Amino acid sequence: MNAGAWALVLSSFLASAVETVEAFTIVLAVGLTRGWRSTVLAVAAALTALAVLVIAVGPSLTAIPLNVLRLAVGGLLLVFGLQWLRKAILRASGYKALHDEVAIFAREAAEARAEPPADPRAFDHYAFSLAFKGVFLEGLEVVFIVLTFGAIHGSIPLAALGAAAAVVAVLVVGFIVRAPLSRVPENTLKFTVGVLLTSFGIFWGVEGAGASWPGNDAALPVIIVTSAVLSVGTASVMRQRKALVQVVAS
Amino acid sequence: MSKIRGFFVFLYDFVIGDDWRMTVAVIAGLALTALGVSRGIMLWGIVPVFVLLGLGWSLVRVVRRDRASA
């Protein structure tokens, strides 16, 4: 595998890992409070819907001319990556609360308990709906990344493989731990994915618009390193500024 | 009607997210690059600069809002 293929698998793996951890928290909260029968059905249904989406949309994406695909997908990846990066910088600098899986688990479990209990032998609509939404909506971001990243790189199966590996890894760890995976460094993962998506979006977007990079493919690692350094630097400056404002305010 | 509206709200939130300014910066950067190419000018640096400005602008707004509420 070349460097581009590794970056493709890594991006899909990391993005999928983050989203699977978040979906796992919701599923665990629903399963433990409402029972596992309808919850497991919902997870299976959501994963099937996501897989159908990849299989249905994937081939049509690869039929689009490469330059049009690069412009459209590069632009979308860039917009999407900037969202991840913005949130990660705000969380790393203290301007946004860190994602707390334990707190989310407690909130979801409390909401599920507040609903009237379902007959254990009957289908639990509430559990199904909550678990389906949790898995489908978190998974949609991964599908978006797998489809766009995979299509532009000409290998949706490779991107899907990276995403599936993350789902399996998180589920295995989750099954062993049987608690919210609060020790997964979600913000660091989101930071990395944000940098990768933004960098690839810049690279492909510019090429799709018809311009060429100096050094062609050699420009990509430079863009990734520059994006990473600038993002970490910005987060660091903002963290210091936030601390200074707090000192002055107190 | 509310379901259609709900879908578009979801789509906006999914693609555009918390700050539309970053999306505008991306579109403007790509459009200027394409315009430059159509006139024979290789403006590969426009998109990175616009991305930097869009993200920077968005972050500065958060910092200012935070300082105002402190």
Image (cartoon, grey):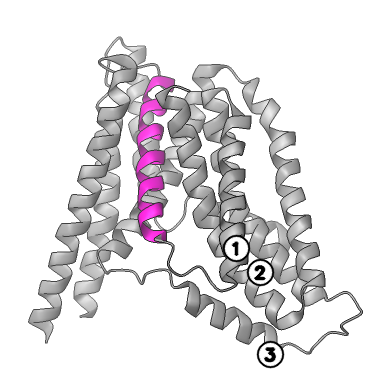
As drawn, A167 above or below A26: above
- In-image side of A38 versus A108 (left or right): right
Dot 3: element: helix
Dot 1: element: helix
As drawn, A41 above or below B29: below
Q: Could you tell me if residue B1 is visible in this image?
A: no
Q: CA distance from mark 3 to mark 1?
A: 20 Å
Seen at 64% across and 27% down, the residue is A61
**Around disc 1, counting alpha carbons within 10 Å, would you say few (fewer than 14), some (14 to 19), or many (20 or more)?**
many
State yes or no: discs 2 and 1 in contact (Cβ < 8 Å).
yes
Position of residue A157 measured from the top left corner of the image (x, y, whole percent)? 63, 31
Q: Chain of mark 1?
A: A
Residue pointed to by mark 2: A27
Q: Residue furthest right?
A: A121
Position of residue A166 measured from the top left corner of the image (x, y, whole percent)? 56, 49
**Around disc 3, counting alpha carbons within 10 Å, would you say few (fewer than 14), some (14 to 19), or many (20 or more)?**
few
Q: Which residues are magenta?
A: A186-208
Asked which quadrant contains residue A44, the reply is bottom right
Q: Chain of mark 3?
A: A
Asked which quadrant contains residue A74, the reply is top left
Residue pointed to by mark 3: A114
Mark 3 vs mark 1: which is more N-terminal? Answer: 1
Residue A106 vs residue B55, the one in the foreground:
A106
Q: Quadrant of the C terminus of chain A?
A: bottom left
- In-image side of B34 versus A169 (left or right): left
Position of residue A8 measured from the top left corner of the image (x, y, whole percent)? 48, 33
Q: Amino acid at mark 2?
A: Val
In the drawing, what numbered circle is on residue A23?
1
Q: Amino acid at mark 1?
A: Ala
Q: Is residue B55 magenta?
A: no
Position of residue A33 measured from the top left corner of the image (x, y, whole percent)? 70, 83
As drawn, A124 above or below A42: below
